[in-house]
Image (tube, rainbow, N blue to C red):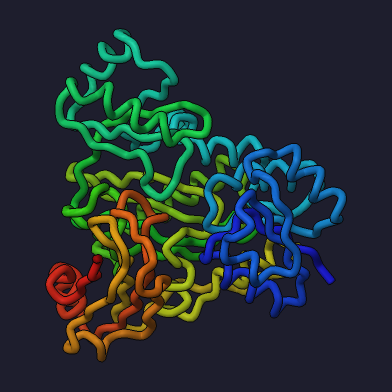
Amino acid sequence: MKKLMLLGGLRYLIPVIEAAHKEGCHVITCDYLPDNIAHKYSDEYHNLSITDKEAVLELARRLGIDGIMSFAVDPGVTTAAYVAENLNLPFAGSYKSVGILQNKALFRDFLTVNNFNVPKAKGCRVYDKSLEDDILNFNWPVIVKPVDSAGSKGVTRIDQPDKLKEAFGFARSFSLSGQVIIEEYIEKRGYSSDSDGFSVNGKLECVSFNSQYFDDEASNPYTPSAYSWPSSFTQGQEAELKSELQRLITLLNLKTSVYNIEVRVGKNDKPYIMEFTPRGGGNRLSEMVRYGSGVDFVTNAVRGAIGLPVDNFSSLDFDGYWAEIILHSNKGGKFDSLQIDEKLRKNIVEEDLWLAKGDPVNSFQGANDAIGTLVFKFETQNEMESALKNRSKWINVIIS
């Protein structure tokens, strides 16, 4: 029986555990939160920090694991790469390459050196006068964020310099390394995309693009609140993005892996790779790909992690128009109920609510403040876009 170690314990790991069990794996989960829900589904749990790469390596060596993943759990990705490299286990790429992808400042530098389209950016640990002077030379507005956190935590857009110091401190409070990146904000044409893709032996076999929606009324308006497939990109834009993603995979000598990929096309019509990380995305993005196209990134990520052959992928062909809404509240309190307009219920494929009445709810600051998901299928693009643009009118999270 193959032993697969999963770093983290979020509910997004449950489909990965189920897929691993179907492949006959013994699943080990580990993090420092024993009450995390995924641990109830694994075969074995160990309490340790997933950012402590030496501790995870020692445990992995002692348990004799056959593979390691940090699916949808961003803080564990570099640790997983470190363990895989030291134990000669299958992984997306080297510890060095993965480290570049997982640090936003290093990633921007890499893109710049290799002539990708990239916003002007600066990574730093200390706020001082020289930083203020440097940023004044940027095109404004700018985005300030931690170099090493996911789920849109600690992210602020600022339009004037007098807000920079406050935004820097806020971002730094969410950074594991205490490092912040400040970059020019790329005004997008149409929608940005945040979805998953898959490479096999260094070839980008398929990638899904979507349209990413945000809630302007949320505490953090840069936390994604809905997605739809297919994307708003043209065929030409998608082809150019795929070409650039393949170039990135080749330059970093990446191998077989699922990836969470954030891209956009700027108002200058240039494609930008904003994030590219060797893990499945949060918010059930790989599951949405499976719903819409039948292509199973989750199972294939498991198979790749334990050294088994993966499917022969073809291009993703979505059956209809699919959407996912991330349920959340824009104020804190206690959950009372979820109200959905009956006219839209016919389109619901899955309703996944994570709370019971009386459970505490946080305002929507980051992906970890979500309270569930809704999966929809629509007959037409217009029907889907209308439902998503007006979602605040027909869906209501009641908080007491």
Question: Outermost residue toward the top?
Answer: 129
- Residue at image x 20%, y 32%? 158
Q: Please indicate, yes or no, whether residue 332 appears anywhere in the rendered image.
A: yes
The spot of residue 183 in percent (x, y) is 31, 30
Question: Outermost residue toward the bottom?
Answer: 346
**Left or right: 286, with 253 as reference point:** left
The spot of residue 384 in percent (x, y) is 21, 77
Q: Decide which of 258, 115 is in the foreground and name it.
A: 258
Question: Which picture quadrant has residue 160?
Answer: top left
Q: Please indicate, yes or no, whether residue 237 appears anywhere in the rendered image.
A: no
- Residue at image x 49%, y 51%? 246
**In the rendered image of this protein, does residue 125 appear above or below residue 258?**
above
The spot of residue 150 in percent (x, y) is 44, 46
Quadrant into which the N terminus falls: bottom right
Q: Decide which of 10, 207 is in the foreground and name it.
A: 10
Q: Decide which of 142, 36 is in the foreground and name it.
A: 36
- Residue at image x 42%, y 21%? 124
**Left or right: 113, with 255 as reference point:** left
- Residue at image x 40%, y 50%? 151
The spot of residue 240 in percent (x, y) is 35, 53
**In the rendered image of this protein, does residue 163 appear above or below residue 86?**
above
Quadrant into which the C terminus falls: bottom left
Question: Which picture quadrant has residue 30?
Answer: bottom right
**In the rendered image of this protein, does residue 169 appear above or below residue 230?**
above
Number of labelled discs? 0
